[in-house]
Image (spheres, rainbow, N blue to C red):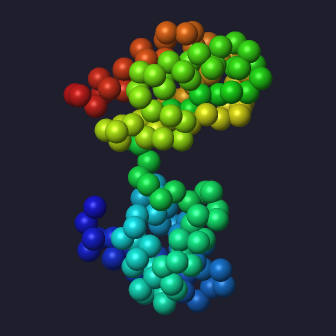
């Protein structure tokens, strides 16, 4: 990530919010919207420009679980664990993904391609069990099918 570009972006964001109460949270939100997380360089620059201690900034980011301190995976995989999905085999799908990609829930694969999340409900109970990759919904997924679905994203990357 280009440090000069980050500094320019951060200064624009700080200037936009500098005269408003509660601006730190809004600045951090906007940074995360832009980058998908709050890069360390960005937090340092916010501290320097806004005269807010870095410990206070990290205190805010770690208090609210919305803020992410690490870059997200390129593709976000969510496996629904709502009642219908759970009863129709979602735990097996989740375990298949975890084992094959060597990743735990809430983590990102070593290559940074996939981020695995377990969610409580995706609102697609009639399609149970359900998983999503990014915003695309895959319903009635059977044990053994998840990696076939994921492999399509690997093929896109290799093109």
The total of numbered circles placed on residues is: 0
Q: Nearer the viewer, residue 91 or 132?
A: 91
Residue 25 screen position, x and y as percent? 60, 72
Percent across and percent down for residue 109 are 39, 37
Residue beneath the point at 66% across and 85% down: 21
> Which quadrant of the structure image shows residue 34?
bottom left
Position above or below: 91 against 45: above
Q: Looking at the rendering, which quadrant does residue 132 occupy?
A: top right
Regarding residue 31, the answer to whether it shows in the image is yes
Q: Residue at x 33, y 77 (%)?
A: 8
* Residue 18 locus on image (x, y percent): 54, 86
Side of 7 relative to 20 (left or right): left
In the depicted structure, whether residue 10 falls above or below residue 77: below
Q: Camera-side residue: 87 or 159?
A: 87
* Left or right placement of residue 150 versus residue 137 in this view: left
Q: Residue at x 77, y 23 (%)?
A: 83
Q: Nearer the viewer, residue 72 or 20?
A: 72
The extreme left residue here reads: 159
The quadrant holding residue 24 is bottom right
Residue 15 makes an appearance in the image: no
x and y, in percent, of residue 10 in the image:
41, 75
Question: Which quarter of the figure is the C terminus placed in?
Answer: top left
- Residue depicted at 40% across the width and 27% down the height: 101
Quadrant where the N terminus is found in the figure: bottom left
């Amino acid at each position: 990530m280009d440090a000069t570009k980050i500094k320019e972006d951060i200064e624009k964001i700080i200037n936009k919010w500098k005269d408003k109460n509660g601006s730190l949270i809004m600045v951090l939100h906007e940074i995360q919207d832009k980058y998908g997380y709050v890069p360390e360089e960005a937090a340092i620059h916010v501290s320097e420009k806004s005269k807010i201690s870095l410990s206070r900034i990290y205190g805010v980011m770690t208090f609210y679980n919305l803020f992410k301190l690490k870059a997200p995976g390129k593709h976000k995989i969510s496996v629904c664990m709502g009642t219908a999905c759970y009863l129709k085999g979602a735990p097996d799908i989740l375990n298949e993904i975890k084992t094959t990609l060597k990743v735990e829930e809430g983590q990102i694969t070593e290559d940074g391609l996939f981020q695995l999340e377990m969610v409580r409900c995706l609102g697609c109970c009639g399609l149970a069990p359900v998983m999503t990759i990014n915003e695309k919904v895959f319903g009635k997924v059977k044990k053994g099918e998840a990696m076939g679905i994921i492999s399509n994203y690997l093929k896109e990357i290799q093109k």
